Amino acid sequence: MQTIRDLSQLRRVRGALRGKVAFVPTMGALHAGHRRLMEIARENADHVIASIFVNPLQFAKNEDLSRYPRREEADAEMLADTGVTILWMPDAATMYPHGFATTVTVSGVSEGLCGASRLGHFDGVATVVAKLFGQIRPNIALFGEKDWQQLAVVRRMVIDLDLGISVIGVPTERDADGLALSSRNAYLSVEERRAAVALPQALDNAANTVMMDKPIRDAEAQAMQDLENAGFRIDYVAIVDSDLRPAKTLADADRIVAAAWIGTTRLIDNRAIKATA
Ligand code: PAF
């Protein structure tokens, strides 16, 4: 694996690659969910390029940019181990040099849910992903389904801008008790970690309730109650259709999505409503 920090070197090395290139963007602090993304990338391409860049544009002023976990050495070891060809590690000056003035906004799908409580977050994500796509020019790109709305935003952007990249969503990896793997789980105390399992449990229960044709809004309310009982402060719990709008009937219910705080840590998760999804 070659670690590259300089854009002209990236262009040279990328230009010499023949065959299909898969790209997995990350912000580091890698876990088994990222390992799975790399493995699937490897299975679907001749070369895998991963990036590590903690993107300041997607953090609001009050968010956790400065405390976001950074573990470069361990991350590089894991990536080399999974067969990544190139690790792209730009710094902020390379990504956003003096005079940088472009923002990519994906309206509609980025506006509700996390977009409503993290203003500007998806502009930051879409801008950095568009920029990384331009630098790397991958054939396929892989994103975890845990960030369901992010995946929808990236898919929309790729279609709208004719980027010609196949976007693959990879199912969420979970701990044995069901908690979705996330770099932010590192913030949880032992007690918070124990309580956090209520999040996937509440979503499973609500999804099962809806699949029994019970009212959608009742299932959401029950999930919120379960989360509050476990000590969460809720940002949102919503059963949505495939465009991430509030689902009205079981037929258009596609996913239950949630974001909630346990202590000072904001966790997100989602679950398919249809057993086949
Ligand atoms: O999901 C993430 O880790 C980030 O949002 C991404 C896609 C790497 C963009 O910074």
Image: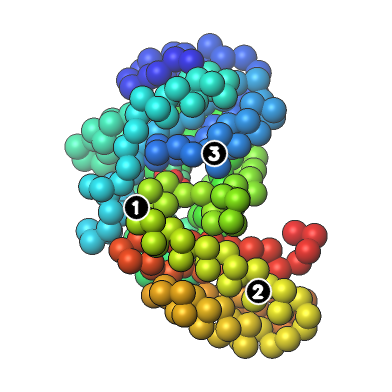
Indicate how the structure is coloured in the image.
rainbow
**C-alpha gap between disc 3 and disc 1:** 17 Å
Badges 2 and 3: C-beta atoms under 8 Å apart?
Answer: no
Q: Is residue 251 left or right of residue 217?
A: right
Label 1 crowd (10 A; few <14 / some 14-19 / many >=20): some
Residue 119 appears in the rendering: no
Question: On the rendered structure, is 25 left or right of 144?
Answer: left
Q: CA distance from mark 1 to mark 2?
A: 26 Å
Amino acid on which the number 2 mark rests in the picture: Asn
Q: Position of residue 155 (x, y in %)?
A: 59, 51
Q: Nearer the viewer, residue 86 or 262?
A: 262
- For the C terminus, the quadrant is bottom right
Task: Please identify the quarter of the rendering in which residue 52 is found.
Answer: top left
Ligand 1 falls in quadrant:
top left
Q: Amino acid at mark 3?
A: Ala
Can you identify the residue that label 2 sits on? 205
